[in-house]
Image (cartoon, helix red, strand yellow):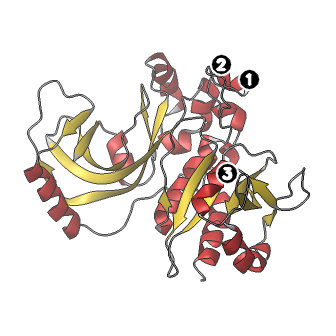
Amino acid sequence: MKGLIIREPWIGMILDGSKTWELRTQPTTMRGEIALIRKGSGQVVGVADLVDSLPQLDPPGLAESVQFHGVPTLEQAGAIANGWLFPWLIVNARQLSSPVPYLHPSGSVTWVNLDPGVSQAIARAKLASRPEPALASSKALMASAPLRSAKAFLIPDAAEHGTDRGGGTIAKISPALEAELIATADRLGVKVKALGSASTKMRSFIVPTRAGDQIMLLDRIPRSSPRFRIFLAPALDNRIAPHIASIPGAQRFVNANTHDHRARHSAFRAFKEPQPDGEPFGHGWLLEEYLAGELFTRLVKVIRGK
């Protein structure tokens, strides 16, 4: 198990659910459960899930996302000067019932590889801890509605032109919106598939149901702002479409070429439905961004048949 070293006050804010973006000087490929180490204490004080590494913030993006990272306005110039502009998305933080000591390796400043004995002690402390995830749903997420300005969160330079330096398309969904959906999914027990790169155009949300896992795909290049697009497997959509249509703030996606709600994309192979030729189909819905967390929650409940 890996432990992430975080100083106060930031580690306390992560543990109480008021901070879900841990700002660092570079992105990370690390995903999954991590231990939270209070810097200078020699102790693991909590655990959390590191679910994503978001694109680099520009100064306006840093200023408009205080509800996620918690850096006060007066300290933001220092964060910019030191390059603390890469948000690591950390959710489901839980404080341990009692801190677990570990031997700090010389020279470790970011990550610590914890030995098996420490990992076992953390597992025991988790069992004794209160099972109340400290998510941002009550603080950071509810305050996020006015922040969703895609322009403020674009990757500098290349994103202004919609392409990366290799010629690919930059995914343009607001990281603030995406962070809210990921944290909401975590709270609901919905699995989130990690992205391959910043230019990945679809993100997968896997909803466990009694009938097996169901997949929702989020289109990360929305063309209908202030709405975002979710695609479902045709068979699933055919079963639950009337229930989704009854949700205020949800409406059918209309394909400009076919004038129906279907779209073709290679990502829809994840649905594993028969497709005679060409790329597979997905059935689309548009959800209002300002109600993102609420609508996503209601959609998950419909898929689960609740």
Check disc 3 and give the amino acid type. Answer: Ala
Report the Cα–Cα distance between label 1 and label 2: 8 Å
Graded by Cα atoms within 10 Å as few (under 14), some (14 to 19) or many (20 or more), the crowding at tag 2 reads few
For image coordinates 31% across by 38% down, the residue present is 8
Graded by Cα atoms within 10 Å as few (under 14), some (14 to 19) or many (20 or more), the crowding at tag 3 reads some
For image coordinates 74% across by 46% down, the residue present is 222
| Foreground residue among 64 and 238 | 238
Residue at image mark 3: 145
Q: Which mark is residue 161?
A: 1
Query: Which mark is nearer the camera, 3 or 1?
Result: 1
| SS at mark 2 in the image | helix
Cβ atoms under marks 3 and 1 closer than 8 Å = no
Q: Which mark is residue 157?
A: 2
Disc nearer the start of the sequence (2/3) = 3
For image coordinates 64% across by 72% down, the residue present is 298
Check disc 2 and give the amino acid type. Answer: Asp
